[in-house]
Image (tube, grey):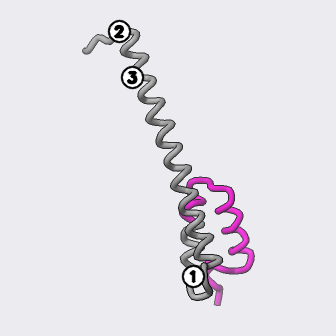
């Protein structure tokens, strides 16, 4: 088994923490991007660019990363019956 000095072990732990922090930061940015795509398709730049099912899909993806605004917009959509399978 390899022997590590205390300073080498501290360096390894610091690198692991930096990697973890980087992943959390990237997930936060990714969820923001998904939310803003959803919002863009929800509101549209012009009427022809409105695509509610696609907006809901992006909100769902962002919600998986616990994006609060995406969860809220998704709840509003569900409250209006959008993005749900209708019972027959």
From mark 3 to mark 2, how far is it between C-alphas? Answer: 11 Å
Q: Are the residues tagged 3 and 2 within 8 Å (C-beta)?
A: no
Range shown magenta: 60-88
- Give x and y (percent) for residue 36: 59, 65
From mark 1 to mark 3, how far is it between C-alphas? Answer: 47 Å
Q: Give the mark nearest the N terminus, 1 or 2.
A: 2
Q: Is mark 3 on a helix, strand or loop?
A: helix
Q: Which residue is identified by label 3?
A: 12
Q: How crowded is mark 1: few (under 14 residues within 10 Å), some or many (20 or more)?
A: some
Question: Front-most of 16 and 79?
Answer: 16
Nearer to us of marks 1 and 2 is 1
Q: Residues within 10 Å of mark 3 (few under 14, many from 20)?
A: few
Q: Are the residues tagged 1 and 3 within 8 Å (C-beta)?
A: no
- Give x and y (percent) for residue 26: 49, 47
Q: Is residue 33 left or right of residue 39?
A: left
Q: Which residue is identified by label 1?
A: 51
Q: Give the mark nearest the N terminus, 1 or 3.
A: 3
Q: What element carries label 2?
A: loop
């Amino acid at each position: 088994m390899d022997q590590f000095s205390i300073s080498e072990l501290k360096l390894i732990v610091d690198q692991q923490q930096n990697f973890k922090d980087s992943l959390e930061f990237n997930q936060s940015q990714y969820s923001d991007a998904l939310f803003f795509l959803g919002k863009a398709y929800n509101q549209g730049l012009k009427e022809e660019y409105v695509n509610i099912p696609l907006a809901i899909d992006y909100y769902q993806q962002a919600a998986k990363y616990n994006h609060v605004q995406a969860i809220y917009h998704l709840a509003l959509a569900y409250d209006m019956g959008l993005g749900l399978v209708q019972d027959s």
